[in-house]
Amino acid sequence: MNEQAINKDLKIVSFKGGVHPQKDGKILSKKASIQTAPLLERYQVIVSQNIGAPPKVVVSAGDEVKKGQLLAEAAGFVSVPLHSPTSGKVEGLVDIPGPMGVMTQAISILADGKDEWTELPASIDWRNSDADTLKKRIMECGIVGMGGAAFPSHVKLSPPPDKKVDYMIINGAECEPYLTADHRVMLEEPEKVLEGAAILGRAAGVKNVVVAVEINKVDAINAMMEKAAQFNVGIVGMKVQYPQGAEKQLIYAVTRRKVPTGALPADVGCIVQNAGTAAAVAEAVNAGIPLIERVTTITGEPVVNPGNWRLRLGTPISEALKLCGGVKCEPGKLILGGPMMGFAQRSTGVSVMKNTSGILLLDKSDVTQYESSPCIRCGRCLEACPMNLQPSALSQLAEAGQYENALKYNVMDCIECGACAFACPAHRPLVQHIRRLKAEIRNRTKKEIKK
Amino acid sequence: MSEEIKKEIMLPKGEELVLSSSPHIHVTENIQSIMLKVVLAMLPALAAAIWFFGIPALLVIFWCVLFCLVLEIIWCRIAGKPASVVKDGSALVTGLLLAMNLPPVTAWWVCLLGALLAIWLGKQVFGGLGQNPFNPAAVARVGLLIALPRQLTYWIPSSGMTADAANYSEVFYAAADFTKIEQAGQVIDGITCATPLSIAQNTPKILDSGVAAADNFAAIANPESYWQYFIGNMGGSLGETSTLAILIGGIILLSFKLIRWQIPLFYLGTVAVFTGLIHLIWPGVTPPPLFHLLTGGLMLAAFFMATDMVTSPITGRGAAIFGIGLGVMTCVIRIWGGFPEGVSFSILLMNALVPLIERMAKLKPFGFRKPTPAKGA
């Protein structure tokens, strides 16, 4: 176990609260180099991959497309275009199982095996170009937050003019257990991440650009520290604590600024972008390559060969699992994303999207179905909550249906990280109760507005 | 060829996959493990009890635990709950706490009555663990103290005290009345002694500040007696006498984060400050603060009783207010009240205030800002 030593110059920061899962599962895949998946016969690219308006499909059945060609164009400001993962023929729009458990529309592309690029836009000399050119390119290449939320990156880069932004934070925390995709990207392509960070900084017009990484990724930190100076980017280490990578917590850890209730990071002068996103931005600006593939961790105890794979959008989960040799035993859960905030799936027909940071299989022994018991008021959830809320009280209000009172306990501030439910010894579904409260309150507000 | 390989690869079958919302992993800690850690923290005090009071104390512990467990199972049967509830360990903790609150020689039927009060009236009528507003062991202790004052104040000397020995012990023998009590159907010779607090209570108060006032409590509040109190060599409830053993347990509780540190800190701090002030003004009214900290049930209450998760405020600020309230009430009862000891009463009274305290001591969320008044309203 010859781990690299932490550089003495590294500043190590953290937020308050949170949890630290004893078994974090990263060991399964953190040593596995990124591999590129072989070309498949067919890709099923889900249309709605970003937060905001789903893009408008511009191809129809029978069309020949090239790799990187536009499949769907942005439908509004908070929207990004979608590009073809390979060259081939559009088979048409099909319904496939979506990540949220309902069928969703996908563009089915039959690969022709040639994998020919379309004509890509020219490289931009980002050091000498203005912010709008960079933002436009980032938007045109379909770049979204690849850490999980899939929020269009160019929107974050365009805060209202009255907000002065002075900090660009690149989120390399990867605080979710099991996931190692960002870790491998930062370790294997440090220059790409740093250059992307610098480009994002320029696009937002800020000088302070920092990559923040949890210190369980010492090799990646050291790799980036070697090259950080040439891009004028700082590196900050963070304590290993979930949810270190949550936006408000990350901003606080790095800058000690607190994003006020209901406000955006730009209100405290910060923009946060994911490390994988930064790498994608570098490719988009330097080579005009749109976002058509991403590094995804395929892992979990039941997986034969856990690893980190460069997968194209539209790769079905079943095909991705085959790359890893399939499963040793029947898993208890299939999750897109990490174990703390990922989404459980029923079907392996779901396909890889821009925000699929991980494909995680949990062993049946790890998927105990707990029976919840009454709160014993131990206070574990209060300690765990990074937002300093009282999940125990909120959960009881949810059970009692007291939505008005839940507002007095600031329910809407919950970031749904799940640290409370993770920590609860009575196995109460705390964050689940809070999600229900939030959804119910939003519904009621909507109804009142209609009246 | 690739077709063949693909056939060998096993993929998950959708039907068997569990669908639930995140988080998908969980800590290994559960209610049972928490309760067992609390039991671990009680072991030093229980061991001290057996050391100082011998087999009778062991018997009391045995009866209390047995009755609490049996009554919990019986209630679950009657109420239609699974009897496996008893495995959560809370009845075990209540049984041990109850024993620690009883005199070292207590008849089995008193233990049974105590267990009834604790498990049924203190906990299960409210819906079981987590729903009870009052500390079950405190309910039992106060109920028994009122119903059976004689049995609940039958103090035997600890093994380190002998009738014909040191000055220290003589103080307590001189103050005691020698009686016979009926235990388990037979009359045995009871040798009783007084507790430091009962002597303090029975000492006439001197309100001026002369030499007599300063010496009023000298017999029970001096460095030698403080040391004996600290190790637990005195009469009292079986689990409350040894401050040393309770502190070891307290460290275990704090290190496992089983109690909120604000409660012992503010409780003991308030008692020290309050009695300190009174002692400073009227030295003949109450002994010095150290006496109050080392005697009676204060230490046991500050670490094991008041800190009960279910019946104390959940926020740090709330726990601090709770501790201060407990301290003030305990002092008032000890100094001016009709009972020599006031911790159990204070705990019940403050338990009742917990919902109010929590309303006052809500947490402010991260990034909280005061809501600005609506424009134009």
Image (cartoon, coloured by chain):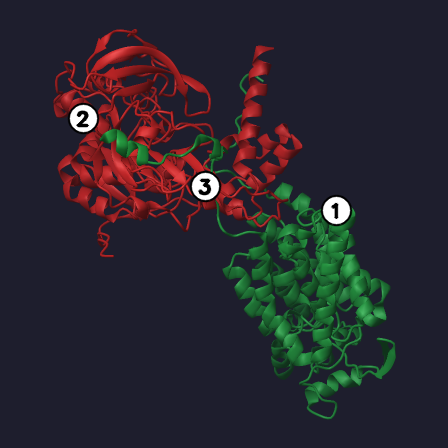
Disc assigned to residue A359: none
Q: Which residue is mark 1?
A: B126
Quick check: B41 above or below B82? below
Q: Please give left or right for residue A335 compared with residue A110 in the image.
A: right
Q: Amino acid at mark 3?
A: Pro
> Which element type, helix, strand or loop, lies under badge 2?
helix
Please say whether residue A240 is visible from this viewpoint: yes
Q: Amino acid at mark 2?
A: Glu
Cβ–Cβ under 8 Å for marks 1 and 2? no
Disc assigned to residue A283: 2
Q: Please give left or right for residue A120 compared with residue A423 in the image.
A: left
Q: Which residue is mark 3?
A: A386
Q: x and y percent of residue A279 in the render?
A: 22, 31
Quick check: B55 above or below A110? below
> Which element type, helix, strand or loop, lies under badge 3?
loop
> Which residue: 34% across, 10% down?
A56
